[in-house]
């Protein structure tokens, strides 16, 4: 900011970001300069170390106000404005019945205004699975201080009378949904469990029907895509399943379920033209150096659900023929680890054995 122009605080914290995010102390109100320990004529970087509500108090005389949050959000039975009078009832007591998401905001905070319609949209879509409580930190500074609010916007999730998680800043909608989904069970979560059960039992038609039920109610639920790939894999349509994985959105590429599916499809592909396990075992007995037979036996064990047997074959392949299939033994073990999950005792044991063999 140059000359004697005052900062017009529209939520860009303390200074216009287009001018470097710096506010000259001489532009502050005298009371602020006194409160900041007489640091004028130094510089005040826009910082989260100062209490947002306190700063808002000083800057209120030069704030350009915007429409109230209620008028921007409209009427909704899932959105409540909270004050000192109803905070305990709505947030503390209410969070014993259902999660309450408290949005700490201020009228001068531009990121707050960007976040508010996102939260309102999600609250309406979740249709009562959580309550969105809006708290104006300008008016309710004591509550903001009680919960350690030092940056705006801050959003805290309350369950059973206490905050259990929070985020700061105007997150994009996808990240807000991810935040909520860590704590709020959706009806589709139960249906996806039903899909998994149907796939495992071989009821593929039933699984497909439930997938369509989920899609009808939550068309943007990306877990549907993973369920459909699992369905194709179980039906033996490996090429279609692999093609679906290639078309997955970027945010699912590193999903643990997708990594496990890649492993399943890889082993299924190995068995496309492979002999039955009996013939392979006979080949390996006759020729212990038959790496192809050992690898295909490992793939059979994976499809049979015998992960320990598969790991043993693959571990032996590492020890006897590291070069086979461009390090197929090591890569195969890693795929089995993905299938088992990092918490599996088998993963811990065989990862240690693999590292010893490799190094």
Image (cartoon, grey):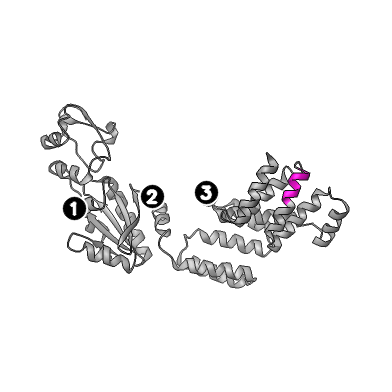
Q: CA distance from mark 2 to mark 3?
A: 16 Å
Q: Residue at x 70, y 53 (%)?
A: 311
Q: Is residue 319 magenta?
A: yes
Q: Is residue 294 magenta?
A: no
Tell me the SS state at disc 2: loop
x and y percentages locating residue 327 in the rendered image = 72, 43
Tell me the SS state at disc 3: helix
- In primary-sequence order, the first of circles 1 and 3 is 1
Q: Is residue 231 left or right of residue 136?
A: right
According to the image, label 2 marks what residue? Answer: 172
Name the disc covering residue 142, or none: 1
- In primary-sequence order, the first of circles 2 and 1 is 1
In the image, which residues are magenta?
Answer: 314-321
Rendered-image quadrant of the C terminus: top right
Q: CA distance from mark 1 to mark 3?
A: 43 Å
According to the image, label 3 marks what residue? Answer: 250
Judge whether 281 appears above or below 8 on screen. Answer: below
Question: Closer to the observer: label 1 or label 3?
Answer: 1
Q: CA distance from mark 2 to mark 1?
A: 29 Å
Mark 1 near mark 3, Cβ–Cβ under 8 Å?
no
Q: Residue at x 57, y 53 (%)?
A: 342
């Amino acid at each position: 900011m140059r000359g004697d122009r005052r900062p017009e605080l529209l939520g860009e914290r303390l200074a216009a970001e287009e001018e470097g995010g710096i506010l000259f102390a001489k532009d502050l109100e005298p009371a602020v300069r006194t409160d900041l320990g007489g640091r004028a004529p130094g510089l005040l970087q826009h910082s989260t170390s100062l209490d947002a509500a306190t700063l808002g108090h000083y800057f209120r005389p030069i704030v350009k106000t915007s429409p109230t949050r209620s008028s921007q959000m409209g009427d909704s039975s899932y959105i409540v404005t909270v004050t000192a009078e109803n905070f305990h009832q709505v947030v503390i007591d209410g969070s014993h019945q259902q999660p309450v998401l408290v949005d700490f905001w201020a009228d001068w905070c531009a990121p707050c205004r960007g976040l508010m319609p996102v939260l309102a949209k999600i609250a309406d879509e979740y249709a009562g699975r959580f309550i969105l409580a809006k708290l104006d930190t300008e008016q309710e500074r004591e509550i903001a201080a009680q919960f350690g609010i030092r940056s705006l916007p801050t959003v805290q999730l309350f369950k059973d009378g206490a905050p259990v998680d929070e985020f700061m800043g105007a997150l994009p909608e996808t990240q807000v949904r991810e935040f909520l989904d860590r704590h709020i069970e959706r009806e589709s979560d139960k249906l996806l469990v039903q899909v998994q059960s149907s796939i495992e039992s071989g009821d593929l038609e039933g699984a497909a029907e439930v997938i369509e039920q989920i899609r009808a109610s939550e068309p943007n639920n990306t877990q549907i895509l993973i369920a459909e790939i699992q369905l194709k894999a179980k039906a033996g349509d490996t090429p279609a399943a692999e093609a679906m994985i290639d078309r997955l959105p970027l945010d699912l590429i590193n999903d643990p379920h997708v990594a496990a599916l890649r492993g399943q499809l890889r082993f299924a592909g190995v068995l496309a033209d492979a002999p039955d396990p009996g013939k392979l075992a006979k080949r390996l007995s006759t020729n212990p150096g038959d790496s192809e037979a050992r690898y295909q036996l490992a793939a059979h064990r994976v499809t049979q659900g015998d992960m320990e047997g598969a790991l043993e074959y693959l571990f032996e392949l590492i020890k006897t023929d590291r070069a086979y299939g461009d390090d197929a033994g090591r890569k195969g073990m890693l795929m089995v680890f993905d299938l088992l999950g990092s918490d599996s005792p088998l993963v811990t044991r065989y990862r240690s054995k693999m590292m010893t063999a490799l190094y």
